[in-house]
DNA sequence: TTGTAAGCGTTATCAC
DNA sequence: GTGATAACGCTTACAA
């Protein structure tokens, strides 16, 4: 009724109801004990004044905000938006709000976000760390006692729970499937940025373990594992890194197909890259899977609808978020057990984009 | 250094630095005037104690939180995740945090979210309203003086800024392109839920204006407009609403194609529905665009990579978010001009999925 | 430039 | 069950 700016406060309500502020507060906040009669009176007064609680004041004294901070690379990326969905569902189910920050893989932005969020006194933090190198801010958070869970990327130096996927095993399984079908010349589209790609540009991808925190690197390692298993040399021409966008994968694929002994199969390390590979094959007039088999990562919604339907490594994306949030809530509730590290399983979903290797001439096999 | 729980406060820092709390606060908060020397002293003391500001306390006294509340239907939906991206970029650029709530199109959840967010004293609210029917909570917000901007859906009863797309014109343009190419039997896959669909189940979609706030309804109206323009009767068999998921669109498409005079073109009202239509055509062995032309909404990343590349109505999705956020920031900065309603333009992107109507027998034309 | 002291709107601790 | 009153950590007149 009374539409004053700055709205009514508990003392206002108390005055109108003819009780003390303490009583009014108890009635409005549903704590302590209040008689039914006063509760009613206070409720009416509050309604009449259009009273709205002030969470800030409450948080100041209770020391809890019922808010979680979430720091991700890029919410526009379907992977992260599904992770966030998992987080959000669990959080809201438990009565927590979610404040979100995009880092765009910038470590500085991340550091700043973590600072701002702790200053806002979030009850806990979910972070998908941009860089495994600079982690002092995360260590600081963990050690300062703010509950923290690492999402999708684990960093050993940070003593916090984590939820990740076994990227290495996933890529290995996908590559194994291809070698089983006789493929020996298998292209890998990684999307790694220049710096990272250079680090791996050593023969046989041997630089890779150093950066296993990195999702892409883990997958690349799995690819190598599978090749080594069947005694195939890892050749650097077959590993291309042009960037993470679709157009980059188009270029990468064309580059692969223009090689002297072009690959008979391609593994694309995420769904956008797979999309680009698919587009490139179409543009080149190369038939999939007849001429080239294609395997992607992430079971995006289009993978089943395209022609041919794409064989993919599916990750439990939403569960990454929900599990992480669940762990965080346990910490917030007071759990003090040592850091937990959940590794979720992936699944190879076989659809139409993979076929046995064409023309498996013995000579070719040996030469690759 | 000193890792006490609950961390250091301004008085602690002040004591260590040998100054008053006011001075310390001024130094730490970068306001008022402090001599370089004291600033230095205070800074050192703060570092030594591991001081972190408490935004809650600051907000209590300043009355501003530098936080925006964002209420959307479903962050997992690529459309909303891109809207959010637009919001987030503008917000962070201006020093605001974003707290996000998913409503899943539930009006109750939305109402509750709005309450919680105002109690948290967000500086402004961006809402994509679930239901045009129950809007008292939004009116309340607007009238209580909390800046509010409606995103992607306008509600006339709520006196707030809004940013939307001209869905009707967009669908009309797409349909017009099809009629220009000689198509007369044009299927529409709307995805509307049962209740809504029923309301429109009157001949010629004449119930549609009543719910024009609804995105889907606006598009359906545009479809009708274009047909009416060329004197084609709107036939209800050609308008199917099986739901919003891909599988629903698959069913819907198969239903359309099994009609006596099956459509020669299909308009799918969002990107997931287009995906389903595409899948269904493949499963049916119907060639696109030779047998049936297909137009979708939203320029999703896969639309250019599939075979054939999909003709779509592109919306400036991210700009919906960024514009909305910009308007909100203006309000927060104190603008008191009357509500602004931005209507963003869409663009028909013609790719390979549309071709002239096959076998345009005069008889068929008239009969539809 | 610096210090004193009065709030901001709650909850929490006591008495009664 | 109810009422004073002291925090919570900060900003902000106002004075010095």
Image (cartoon, coloured by chain):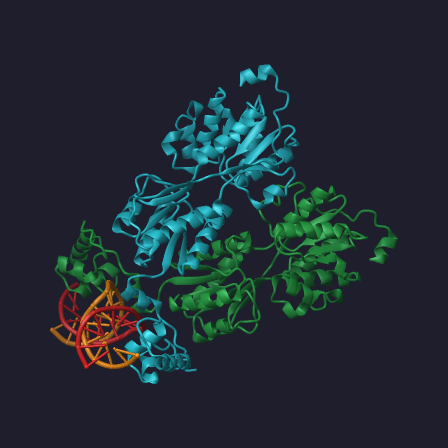
Chain colours: A green, B cyan, C orange, D red
How far across and how far down the image is residue B198, in percent? Answer: 42, 30
Residue at screen point 87% across, 53% down: A362
- Residue closest to the eye, B323 or B367: B323
Residue B234 in view in this figure: no
Q: Image check: B366 left or right of B89?
A: right
Q: Image check: B271 left or right of B142?
A: right
- Residue closest to the eye, D8 or B48: B48
How far across and how far down the image is residue A87, in percent? Answer: 47, 57
Residue A219 in view in this figure: yes
The residue lying furthest to the right in this view is A363
Residue B285 vertical position relative to residue A165 in the rendered view, above or below: above
Which quadrant of the view contains residue A105? bottom right
How far across and how far down the image is residue A30, in percent? Answer: 25, 60
What quarter of the picture does the N terminus of chain B occupy? Answer: bottom left
- Residue closest to the eye, A118 or A241: A241
Q: Image check: B197 left or right of B27?
A: right
How far across and how far down the image is residue B217, in percent? Answer: 43, 34
Residue D11 vertical position relative to residue B17 in the rendered view, above or below: above
Residue C1 vertical position relative to residue A95 in the rendered view, above or below: below
Query: Number of labelled discs?
Result: 0
Q: Image check: B99 left or right of B304?
A: left
């Amino acid at each position: 009724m009374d539409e004053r700016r700055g709205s009514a406060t508990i003392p206002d309500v108390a005055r109108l109801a003819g009780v003390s502020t303490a009583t009014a507060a108890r009635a409005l906040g549903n704590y302590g004990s209040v008689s039914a009669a006063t509760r009613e009176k206070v409720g009416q007064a509050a309604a009449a004044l259009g009273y709205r609680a002030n969470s800030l004041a409450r948080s100041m004294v209770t020391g809890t905000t019922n808010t979680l901070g979430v720091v991700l690379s890029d919410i526009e990326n379907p992977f992260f938006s599904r992770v966030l969905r998992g987080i959000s569902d669990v959080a809201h189910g438990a009565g927590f709000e979610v404040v979100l920050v995009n880092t765009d893989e910038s470590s500085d932005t991340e550091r700043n976000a973590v600072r701002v969020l702790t200053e806002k006194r979030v009850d806990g933090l979910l972070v998908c760390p941009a860089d495994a190198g600079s982690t002092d801010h995360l260590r600081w958070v963990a050690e300062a006692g703010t509950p923290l869970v690492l999402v999708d990327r684990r960093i050993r130096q940070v003593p916090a729970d984590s939820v990740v996927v076994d990227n290495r095993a996933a890529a290995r399984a996908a590559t194994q499937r291809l070698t089983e079908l006789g493929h020996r010349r298998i292209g890998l589209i990684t999307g790694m940025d220049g710096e990272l790609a250079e680090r791996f540009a050593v023969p046989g991808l041997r630089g890779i373990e150093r950066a296993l925190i990195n999702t892409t690197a883990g997958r690349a390692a799995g690819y190598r594992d599978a090749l080594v298993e069947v005694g195939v040399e890892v050749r650097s021409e077959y590993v291309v890194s042009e960037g993470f966008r679709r157009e980059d994968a188009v270029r990468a694929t064309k580059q692969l197909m223009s090689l002297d002994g072009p690959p008979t199969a391609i593994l694309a390390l995420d769904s956008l890259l797979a999309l680009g590979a698919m587009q490139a094959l179409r543009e080149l007039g190369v038939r999939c899977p007849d001429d080239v088999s294609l395997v992607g990562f992430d079971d995006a919604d289009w993978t089943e609808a395209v022609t041919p339907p794409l064989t993919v490594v599916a990750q439990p994306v939403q569960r990454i978020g929900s599990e992480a949030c669940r762990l965080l809530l346990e910490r917030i509730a007071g759990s003090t057990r040592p850091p937990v590290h959940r590794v979720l399983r992936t699944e190879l979903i076989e659809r139409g984009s993979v076929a046995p290797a064409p023309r498996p001439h013995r000579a070719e096999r040996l030469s690759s």
